[in-house]
Image: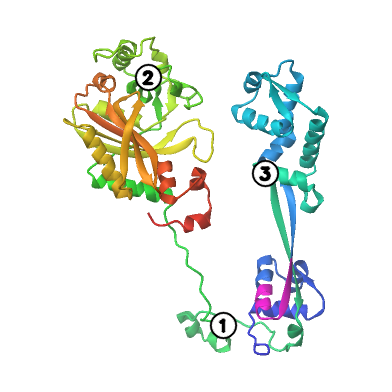
Amino acid sequence: MTDGVELTNPERRMRRSMLVAPSEVHTRDRIMDACDWNDQAVAVGAGQGLCDKGVVEIQETVRRTIHPGQEGHNAIANGLLEARLWSWISSQDEPTMAKLQAKFERHEAGPGVGLLKKLGVQRDSGSFVCDDPSMLKSELQARNMFLASLPADEEDLSERLLSHFKGRKELIEVVEHRSRTWKLTEAGKAMSSDGLDERKQISEITPELLQSGDWKDAEFRSFDVTLESATPRTGRSHPMQELIERIRRIFLEMGFSELVDDYVQTAGWNMDALFIPQDHPAREMQDTFYLDSPASIELDPELVQKWKDIHEHGGETGSRGWSGSFSEDVSKRGLLRTHTTVNTIQHLANNPNEPCRVFSVDRVFRKEAIDSTHLPEFHQIEGIIMEPGANLQMLVTTLKTFYAKMGYPEVRVRPAYFPYTEPSLEIEVKWKGKWLELGGAGIFRPEVTEPLGISSPVCAWGMGLERLAMLVLGLDDIRQLYISDLEWLRNQPLL
């Protein structure tokens, strides 16, 4: 106790060391040396405690340094994107957009041309021209020199270039360096130096303490019970996992069984079985992750022949198929599934005569550019009803029931087109006065069911989980679901 102010042992030691030079400003390193501390957190905590008690005043300074980000290091090593594009354009006799797209990656060509447009580069008759090449060259050189000068203090850098690079993703990062100094207040200097010896302080009474008798010579630490206590943080599921569990509960309550299967599939099961033509845009590399290992997976030759007949001339379904030729090698290609329908169709093939109601909530993969509404890896909600008498009204009623249980009672459907269902529907729910499309549905075509020996109608639907999550959580950017923002996660409602 010092003049009525109770200090902890670290606070006593810190004040005792500062009284050696009571009028000076004490740095962190000086305090740690004088107090024989190795952990700066102890010094900071003791200093804050003394400040709260009016014994010292704290001065804090912040210095910001600019460092290259991940893309910044790439730009330093390989050159800025706009500089590389302009260098290539300058070296070409006819620098057309088509040639540029062939030379550079898809994720580089578009953004790079956008950066050059801001620097005065325009497209003229399919080629690229610049009204002031010297200005462009000077600006590119200034940007390169800016990156090469990093790391550097923020105040030493060009405000214009700093603002430019802050607006570009991961080219630079700002690092803050905070330093504190402490100085005794007039009240701190005037306080008595008595009672600065360190003693054992007790904050919790235990049976061992009472039995040992050490409490007799110890000092009991007091607590201010009027202060607000910290809110305890407990563990909880991620909002996406909570939403998945909620969807599972709803389908299980409705009498469905859950289906879980493999990510790696063949193009045959993923597309051919669903009557998606082999020249469909979904087969292109920009939409599907094809595998090198396994590059090919064997299929039942009899099944492949049935798919071949269906695609080329409709088989025995009465359809004319897609015409053209069907490649068995394409059918055997290994890939990461692009939808969970690939697994439900296999379940039907293994149980063609057994009525079922199954669903799945699982991951699918497509080669998408990452933005506010697209991810290359996402989740799909899939369901089917296969039984005698299954019809469109049953399908619509099931979907309306599901969305009503999710809290969206206003649901409507409208005609749509999918290669493997007829009739086909798109499902919309009303949210904040607007109709939002959330998925597709329909009844499997005969070209899908008959090769597998299925005689009963099959109602099917699929929807994106992330899009539903954005709706439920009120998000504008799908990426927020996978950012480790603890404060955002803590503030999410229980689903």
Mark toward the viewer: 3 or 1: 3
Tag 3 and tag 1, C-beta contact below 8 Å:
no
User: Could you tell whether 16 is left or right of 49 in the image?
Assistant: right
For badge 2, the amino acid type reads Glu
Q: Which mark is residue 139?
A: none
Q: List the residue tagged with mark 1.
A: 221
Q: CA distance from mark 2 to mark 1?
A: 74 Å
Q: In percent of the image, x 34 and y 14: which residue is there?
A: 311
User: Disc 2 marks which residue?
Assistant: 298
Choose the circle earlier in sequence order: 2 or 3: 3
Residue found at x 69% / y 70%: 43
Return the residue at label 3.
167
Q: Amino acid at mark 1?
A: Arg
Residue at 71 percent across and 34 percent down: it is 118
Local secondary structure at mark 3: loop
**Is there CB contact under 8 Å for labels 2 and 1?**
no
Calculate the distance from the C-alpha at mark 3 to the C-alpha at mark 1.
51 Å
Tag 3: amino acid: Gly
Quadrant for the N terminus, please.
bottom right
Q: Looking at the rendering, which quadrant does residue 223 occupy?
A: bottom right
Question: In which image quadrant can residue 363 be found?
Answer: top left
Dot 2, crowdedness within 10 Å: few (<14), some or many (≥20)?
A: few
SS assignment at label 2: loop
Task: Give the residues drawn in magenta, as a range.
Answer: 46-60
Q: Is residue 258 above or below residue 131?
A: below
